[in-house]
Image: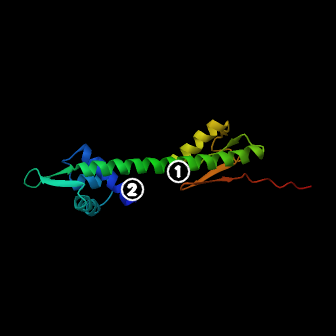
Amino acid sequence: MASDPTLRELELLEQIERDPDVTQASLAAQLGVAVGTVNWHLKRLVAKGYVKVKRAQRRKLRYIITPEGLAFRARLTVNYIETSLRLYRRVRERVRRLLSDVREAGFDSVRLPDGDGDIVDICRLTCLEQGIAVAGEGRRDVPLLRVRGTQVAVEWPQQEEVHV
């Protein structure tokens, strides 16, 4: 589950919309948080008028998203998309500049970090777009695009010393 409270609320609303009979325990399991965290967020959503709770059976609750809750979810979704696109554009522009530096230094390929991730995917896509090959992991003679969080930097290959 996201660490941003608004993203947590968006995820909860999406899960409730999919299954109004979902339990707090199953929400917690699906979202990877404690039941208490789910309970706290649900209480906030109820207090704001975005979710209503009805008793479905003796011990079973049903969560109903109100019209205000649907509008709130829509706003959260739009904000999330806008934020994601800003990040995507910023990372793409940064990687384009780095790849320009790589090309100016005489390289036509780079290495990418091991593993997956959205930022690595953006790097891979930008390399493809810019005509820069992605070299295999074993290549230490080409620059590495180092990814730390949302930041990308070039790690240049070590130059061997020449003894005369």
Residue at (61, 41) in percent of width and height: 126
Residue type pointed to by label 2: Ala
Residue 8 spot, x, y in % from top left: 34, 56
Q: Secondary structure at mark 1?
A: helix
Q: Is residue 87 shown left or right of residue 163?
A: left
Left of 112 or right of it: where is 71? left
Give the quadrant of residue 59. Answer: bottom left
Marks 2 and 1, the one that precedes in the sequence: 2
Numbered circle sitting on residue 87: 1
Q: Is residue 159 above or below residue 126?
A: below
Give the percent coordinates (x, y) of residue 148.
57, 56
Quarter of the N terminus within the rendering: bottom left
Name the residue tied to disc 2.
2
Q: Nearer the viewer, residue 12 or 155?
A: 12
Name, please, the residue furthest toward the right.
164
Q: Secondary structure at mark 2?
A: loop
In this rendering, position of residue 54 left or right of residue 164: left
